[in-house]
Amino acid sequence: MNSMIAKLAIAAAVIGCGLQAASAETANIWVRADGSNFMPRIVDAFNKAHKDQIKLDIIPNAEIIPKYGAAAAGGTAPDALSLDLIYTPSFAAAGQLEDITDWAKSLPYFSSLSPAHVKTGTYKGRIYGLPFSADSSVLIWNKKLFKQAGLDPEKGPTNWAEIEADAEKVNALGGDIKGFYFSGNCGGCNIFTFTPLIWASGGDILSEDGSKATLDSPQLRGAIDLYRSMVKKGLVPAGAETDVGHDFFAAFATGKIGLSPSGAFAIGALNTQYPDIDYGITFLPGKDGGWSSFAGGDNFVVTKGTKKIEVVKEFLDFAYSLEGQTILAKYGSLPVRGDIAKEALKDLDPRYQVAAEAMAKGKTPYSVVFNDLINSANGPWTQMINEVFFGDDVDGAIANAQETMQSIIDQAPQK
Amino acid sequence: MTSIAATASSARARKLVGVSRRQWVGLLYVLPAVALVTVFFVIPLGMTAWMSLNNWPLMGEHAFIGFDNYVAILRDNRFWNALKFTFYYTVIVTIAIFAVAFPLAIFIERPRPLTNLYRTAFFMPAVVGFASASLLWSWLLNVDSGLFSPAALDLGLTEKKVNLLATFQPAFWSIIAMVVWKVAGFTMIILMTGLQSIPQDLQEAAVIDGAGPFARFRAITLPLMRRTLALALILSVAGSILAFDQFYIILRGGPRNQTLTAVYWIFNQSFVSFKLGYGAALSMVLLLILVALSLIQLWLLRKPEGLD
């Protein structure tokens, strides 16, 4: 009975609109709180310029996954969402996402979209996610402290030995000033800023397809020794050992830290919230030079079966335009279209160019169980980094993590 | 729950001799409670039981798999380790709470100057939510910006800043201290009502008979407080077996996953690994353990034959 009435109402509405082929529609989009700066701006710009509209909901970072799962089960999922890119494989594996391969490949600029995003957005050869926002990992240093310590404030370290030497010199200033900072109990922070040290030296922690854990590489061991040595020499504040990420950015922002691995997001945050801190930005180096970066940020994914897919595509197309990319860049994300990145960034802080360059060569581990392995506060990666940086049994911790990781990978649902 | 069951069974018994109007009215009064229990306890419990028999991911289709989840629990070492830690914590924290709450209850039981002030002060932390209290303590315990470590340094108790949360023993005992601070006041009030219900003339008679304070405590106070103790003990044990907030907020299960509790593991399996069905099965196992523990406690502290 109700559905009859609904059908009649829809019919009446259609007749009421006459024969207009496309009446304005509204699509619902979710974004995690990390995007709360740039997302509303770009949605506003889109809504002003288009007949179709986007309704945006901002969801706390930690809640977006369970909330989306519950909404999908109850049939109230949004039409699309901007999702931490590392989750795209597991969402695609769950059969939750719309296959957008044909549309994606029809985009004239498809080949210049952030390769790391497209790689994580691809599952079994089909594309389920496209890049939306981007964040690369970089090394930042405090120029004022470098000067005080007698270092060249314009020159950041370019290999591991220089990192340690610079940190030591800054640390020697004494008082509350420390040479180096990292969040020692935060898996997500360290996959973002610690693995690039390993990648830049030729090692890795996971095989290319995510089917093997490779923690027993000598490059990992070398990077661990660098961090251990700095901890042992007292270059790192005591709080780092238990920091689950709260001070990932905040520690450097106090102005009492010489060097800290961080992300492109720090540029915007420092410029707007801590304008007094003079800082430099460089790549995360390998043992003897070279560099690498994590490619982070969000993929844009479409809920399977949505009826608003045309609106969603229209919106994404707008986000990829120069106007869209410029808005994103201005409010805290790196551009995801390599071909127009320079143009989108041209009026912004020149330090963004370093981050953008890092992004273009950025790397993202691929796994359907990334959350279990890496991001979980109780997963094997988080436990291992804490043990190897601060504990006594490095080899045991690595062996244990290698075994646990491999068993989680092996038990993952194979579809 | 028990009162509802009791009402229902006594109503059934009297049906044989005809149910009076009064009893129907009584039944009407408990209906809202029955409805609440049904909606918020019986139905969710039934759903949890059903989910536990399915492979139920957070996203995507679920499929019936019978008892596979329960079989998987048998091999889940990390769950059994979490359970072991939970029991260890429960024993320690319960002893600690009683060790603090009992003397406090005796201290504030009889009116004397400032008793009301003490009662309020001791009880105050109990009204703070566990999550808020955990946030407060996670700040107090912070090595750089908190209170304890910088204060110890300033007072010359330590030579350098000590990160209390970085190794197991200090981290574990910090949590125990926080929980005792938060819960002892509540347990104290329960024990105090028990103490106050002991007739004063019994104590006086014992004094006349020449019993010392310790003998009076053992022979009069303790036996007459059996029920109160049972209540306080069950509340403490059930609360501790279900501990989650403080370990999640202050320690995140750390240092190095040494303080993962059973509920924490259920949470992880459900919302980090996205295995809701498996989480439901773990919840059912924990529920059974809790029911068994409560029954054992009730039996141990049952009223001895012949007393009153």
Image: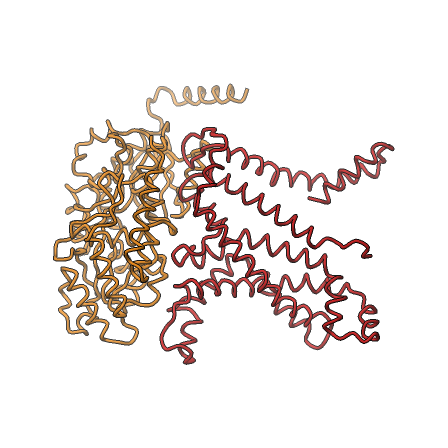
Residue B126 horizontal/vertical position (percent): 59, 61
Residue A44 is at least partly visible in this image: no
Colour displayed for chain B in the image of the structure: red
Q: Most extreme residue toward the bottom, as rendered?
A: B156
| Picture residue at 61% right of the left edge, 68% below the top | B122
Give the total number of marks visible in the rendering: 0
Q: Quadrant of the C terminus of chain B?
A: bottom right
Task: Identify the image quadrant of the N terminus of chain B.
Answer: top right
Residue B117 appears in the rendering: yes
| Protein image colouring | by chain
**Residue A39 appears left or right of A286:** right
Image quadrant in which you'd find residue B114: bottom right
Using the image as rendered, state which of residue A42 and residue A109 is in the foreground: A109
Image location of residue B301, percent across then percent down:
70, 55
* Residue B273 against residue A399 in the figure, above or below: above
Position of residue B2 measured from the top left corner of the image (x, y, whole percent): 71, 44
Quick one: A359 or B80, which is closer to the camera? B80
Q: Is residue B72 above or below residue B145?
A: above
Seen in the image, is A234 located left or right of residue B22?
A: left
Quadrant in which residue B57 is drawn: top left
The chain painted orange is A
Q: Residue at image x 27%, y 33%?
A: A123
Q: Residue A396: give x, y in percent of width and height.
A: 31, 55
Q: Nearer the viewer, residue A275 or A197?
A: A197
The quarter of the displayed image where residue A142 is located:
bottom left
Give the residue at x 38% y 36%. Answer: A28
